[in-house]
Amino acid sequence: MSWMEWYDSLLKPSWTPAPSTIGMIWQVLYPVILVTFSFVIVQAARKKIPWGVTAPFIINLVANGLFTPIQFGLRNLPLAALDILVVWGTIIWMVAAIWKYYRWVALAQLPYFIWVSIASSLQLHITWYN
């Protein structure tokens, strides 16, 4: 069964966005992530901020990148739920770490945080139902 057939077969809450909506949201968020994460890494390389500030950004990027292979490749719902909670938690950590250096980077994470909060709730519901 294809990943889409598998995903369609899962029990989901009534408020689940259409896959095309989810894709559209990520198309908006990924450029923001690219710009802000790159900026933070460049500032660390220029020694304008400590390298430790980049830790939550790097962990977030890895966890975000692992979600799709875990969810749709391994089809492991509990592990995907844990992974998305790592993504969610590291966004909070990122905001706290960068706030005193570049508040605009912290504020730029707000749409990302809102979406991942919704996506986390969705993933936890799907995991519970299935």
Image (cartoon, grey):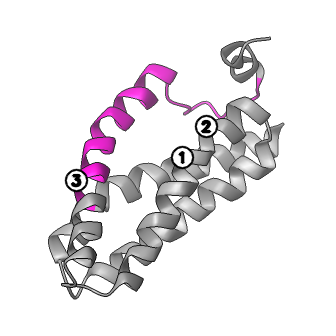
Tell which of 46 and 29 is nearer to you. 46
Disc 3 or 1, which lies upstream in sequence?
A: 3
Marks 2/3: CA distance?
22 Å
Tell which of 75 and 61 is nearer to you. 61
Residue 58: say if magenta: no
**How many numbered marks are there?**
3
Q: Which residue is mark 1?
A: 65
Residue drawn at (34%, 75%) of the image: 95
Q: Secondary structure at mark 1?
A: helix
Tell which of 128 and 107 is nearer to you. 107
Marks 3/1: CA distance?
16 Å
Other residues around mark 3 within 10 Å, as few (<14) / some (14–19) / many (≥20): few
Magenta range is 10-36
Q: Is residue 1 left or right of residue 50?
A: right
Q: Which percent across, then down, holds residue 4? A: 66, 16
Asked if 105 appears above or below 72 in the picture, the reply is below
Marks 1/2: CA distance?
7 Å
Which quarter of the picture shows residue 37? bottom left
Please, what is the three-letter code of the amino acid marked with disc 2?
A: Thr
Residue drawn at (23%, 68%) of the image: 42
Q: Which residue is mark 3?
A: 35
Q: Is residue 102 left or right of residue 94?
A: left
Give the prevailing secondary structure in the magenta stretch: helix
Please, what is the three-letter code of the amino acid marked with disc 3?
A: Val
The answer to whether mark 3 and mark 1 are in CB contact below 8 A is: no
Quadrant where the N terminus lies? top right
The answer to whether mark 1 and mark 2 are in CB contact below 8 A is: yes
* Farthest right residue in view: 130
